[in-house]
């Protein structure tokens, strides 16, 4: 049923004409996403020019068209503004000598949290680390750049849509963090089936079209692997440093090497490695059990001359709070694992300052 409604929505939006261009908004590539769930339509429309009168007409025509679909009870249209003369279009994939994009130019540090493969707890680390920075008194942003599998909305308990004035999208604030995720734009049940170009546009919009404002640090939860999204962000932003998350499993460590080499080639500073789920911390006795046997992460770190900054446990309360949508580091800052995240944040902050000092000399 949802797929049929989406097809109907695209068909009707194809009848909404940009009169100045003489073409419909679907053919012009202005419709960036359409998803339907339980009678509700979510749609993202990108305007090419800041012409309020013309854009309002297109918005009203699109809204009217979508409301005519039988079974649709609510229409939510988010609009963004694209600038053709972006000065970042020809940036080389190199983080040196680059200033941040207009949307993030008031953010002092940008930390990319990455992993070579999925399932290692990268989003858990990113969300709790953001809360740890906040607990240190830093104004903190959290960007979920995992387009295909956004986890941050679940982990910080957000189930609402961001507001927009037609030009800028406002961040959603939770636990003292300014956050944005593609997961806010689409429904949980609907997969995001986009080709590379659409993904790149979505990333650009979450950077340039979001009102991030001034902040001390932005934590970016990257998608796993070494693909287009990672390269696009490196190309667009002056990333201050990266953090690689892995587990003790051999298969995870193979992918860690790929991640390290990607950041090395693109000259993004690698601040260190975090081994997640290093051991199981029994809640009743506090005893540690190694679930994956002896870890080889240290061997990889030594071989490539990087430091393991933290060995985080597989802790039941940490996982429970991820499911409940309230990061443990914010909820119980005195917890042993929360203190590990806070110590990690302090360590990373020192390293970020050293990297910044090295780049200015």
Image: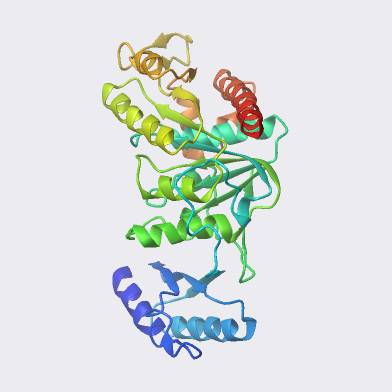
Q: Position of residue 189 (x, y in %)?
A: 36, 57
Residue at 31% across / 27% down in the picture? Answer: 252
Specify the quadrant of the image occupied by residue 131.
top right
129 w.r.t. 107: above or below: above
Of the pair 80 and 263, the residue shown nearer to us: 263
Q: Is residue 227 visible?
A: yes
Q: Position of residue 302 (x, y in %)?
A: 40, 14
Q: Quadrant for the C terminus, please.
A: top right
Query: Which colour style is shown?
Result: rainbow
Q: Is residue 135 left or right of residue 142?
A: right
Total numbered labels:
0
Q: Is residue 324 left or right of residue 108?
A: left
Q: Is residue 175 visible?
A: no
Of the pair 197 and 296, the residue shown nearer to us: 197
Residue at 44% across / 8% down in the picture? Answer: 287
Residue reaching furthest to the left: 251
Q: Position of residue 31 (x, y in %)?
A: 43, 73
Specify the quadrant of the image occupied by residue 141.
top right
128 w.r.t. 188: above or below: above
Q: Position of residue 3 (x, y in %)?
A: 30, 70
Specify the quadrant of the image occupied by residue 138.
top right
213 w.r.t. 238: above or below: below
Q: Is residue 148 left or right of residue 243?
A: left
155 w.r.t. 63: above or below: above
Of the pair 207 and 221, the residue shown nearer to us: 207
Q: Quadrant for the N terminus, please.
A: bottom left
Residue reaching furthest to the right: 137
């Amino acid at each position: 049923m949802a797929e049929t409604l989406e097809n109907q929505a695209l068909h009707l939006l194809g009848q909404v004409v940009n009169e100045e261009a003489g073409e419909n908004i679907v053919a012009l590539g202005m419709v960036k996403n359409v998803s339907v769930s339980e009678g509700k339509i979510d749609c993202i429309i990108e305007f090419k020019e800041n012409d309020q009168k013309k854009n309002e007409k297109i918005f009203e025509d699109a809204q009217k068209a979508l409301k005519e679909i039988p079974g649709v009870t609510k229409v939510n249209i988010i609009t963004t503004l694209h600038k053709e003369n972006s000065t970042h279009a020809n940036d080389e994939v190199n983080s040196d000598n680059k200033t941040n994009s207009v949307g993030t130019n008031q953010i002092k540090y940008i930390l990319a949290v990455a992993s070579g493969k999925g399932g290692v707890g990268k989003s858990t680390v990113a969300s709790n680390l953001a809360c740890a920075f906040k607990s240190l008194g830093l104004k903190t942003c959290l960007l979920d750049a995992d387009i295909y599998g956004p986890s941050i909305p679940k982990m910080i308990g957000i189930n609402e849509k961001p507001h927009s004035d037609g030009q800028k999208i406002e961040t959603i604030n939770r636990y003292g963090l300014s956050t944005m995720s593609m997961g806010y734009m689409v429904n949980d049940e609907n997969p995001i089936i986009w080709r590379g170009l659409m993904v790149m546009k979505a990333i650009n919009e979450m950077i340039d079209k979001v009102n991030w404002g001034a902040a001390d640090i932005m934590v970016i939860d990257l998608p796993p692997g070494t693909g287009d999204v990672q390269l696009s962000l490196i190309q667009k932003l002056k990333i201050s440093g990266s953090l690689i998350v892995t587990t003790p499993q051999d298969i995870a460590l193979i992918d860690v090497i790929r991640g390290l080499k990607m950041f090395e080639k693109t000259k993004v500073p690698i601040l260190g490695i975090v081994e997640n789920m290093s051991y199981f911390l029994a809640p009743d006795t506090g005893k540690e059990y190694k679930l994956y046997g002896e870890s080889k992460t240290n061997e990889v770190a030594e071989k490539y001359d990087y430091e393991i900054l933290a060995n985080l446990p597989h802790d039941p309360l940490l996982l429970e709070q991820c499911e409940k949508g309230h990061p443990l580091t914010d909820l119980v800052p005195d917890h042993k694992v929360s203190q590990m995240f806070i110590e990690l944040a302090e360590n990373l902050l020192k390293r970020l300052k050293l990297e910044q000092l090295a780049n200015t000399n």
